[in-house]
């Protein structure tokens, strides 16, 4: 189904050297732009003496949510080759940062492209690629007598319950696979006095 995607299980690293320059690569699974900013910030602090922090990321379904950054290297010589590797391995929800320590010898644009590409590839290949599902978060509002029916539908569709509030009116929040979103919302919506909202993550 189209809601399956490939990503990294956990962060991984790589290293490439060319004529004295060192290219340290870091690959991370990420869910959103805030995580990307946090990671970039902490790497800039830790490797503050490096000349360049170049990166690319891709988040979410489709090819539209991505960004590349050359961080002072010649245009398209760093971020684009990093993104090329993310696309080549068909990954998403991934950030790759390549940090360069200059070795005194200019590598030329061709040399830089090769270096950033290879460093990114090293980080990916040292990692563990897994398949996951894009998730949708639901808020289900219902009356107490419908509890068993609501829970049964969620369980049958392997929903992960993320919150419960059983007050005067009941509320369950749950995370489900995007591919079954319509099916689940239709089933829940057929229960008397039950409302379902899609919650933006």
Image (cartoon, rainbow, N blue to C red):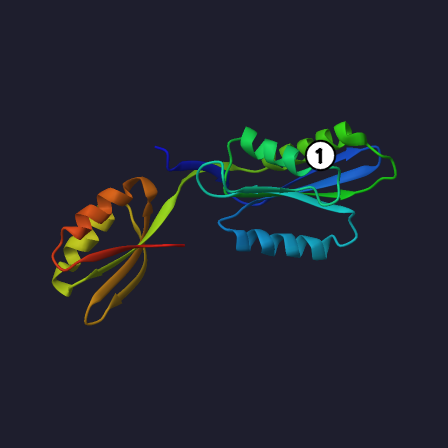
Label 1, on which residue? 77
Q: Residue furthest front?
A: 75
Which x, y percent locates residue 68? Answer: 62, 41
Q: Which residue lies at the image location 21% right of the left edge and 65% below the top edge?
A: 170
At x 51%, y 31%, the residue is 90
Of 4 and 56, nearer the camera is 56
Nearer-the-camera pick, 147 or 90: 90
Which of the 4 image quadrants contains residue 166?
bottom left
Image spot of residue 190 (x, y percent):
14, 50
Residue 127 x, y percent position in the rendering = 57, 38
Residue 143, can we see it?
yes
Looking at the image, residue 135 sits to the left or right of residue 11; the answer is left
Is residue 85 rendered to the left or right of residue 77?
left
Residues packed near mark 1 inside 10 Å, few (<14), some (14 to 19) or many (20 plus): many
- Is residue 26 visible to us here? no
Residue in view at x 75 percent, y 37 percent: 74
Q: Quadrant of the N terminus?
A: top left
Q: Is residue 17 above or below residue 99?
A: above
Q: Residue lying farthest bottom?
A: 168
Residue drawn at x 37%, y 34% is: 2
**Quarter occupied by the C terminus:** bottom left
């Amino acid at each position: 189904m189209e809601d399956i995607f490939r990503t990294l299980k956990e962060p991984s690293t790589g290293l490439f050297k060319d004529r004295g320059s060192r290219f340290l690569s870091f690959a991370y699974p990420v869910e959103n732009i805030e995580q990307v900013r946090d990671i970039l910030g902490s790497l800039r602090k830790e490797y503050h003496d490096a000349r360049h922090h170049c990166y690319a990321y891709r988040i979410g379904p489709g090819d539209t949510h991505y960004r590349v950054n050359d961080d002072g290297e010649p245009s398209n010589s760093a971020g684009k080759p990093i993104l090329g590797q993310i696309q080549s391995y068909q990954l998403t929800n991934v950030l790759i940062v390549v940090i360069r320590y200059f070795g005194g010898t200019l590598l030329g644009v061709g040399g830089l492209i090769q270096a950033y590409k290879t460093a990114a590839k090293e980080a990916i290949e040292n990692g563990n690629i897994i398949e996951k599902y894009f998730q949708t978060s639901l808020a289900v509002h219902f009356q107490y007598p419908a509890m068993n029916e609501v829970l049964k539908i969620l369980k049958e569709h392997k929903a992960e319950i993320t919150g419960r509030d059983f007050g005067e009116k009941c509320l369950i929040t749950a995370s489900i696979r995007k591919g079954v979103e319509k099916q689940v919302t239709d089933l829940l919506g057929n229960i008397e006095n039950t409302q379902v909202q899609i919650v933006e993550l």
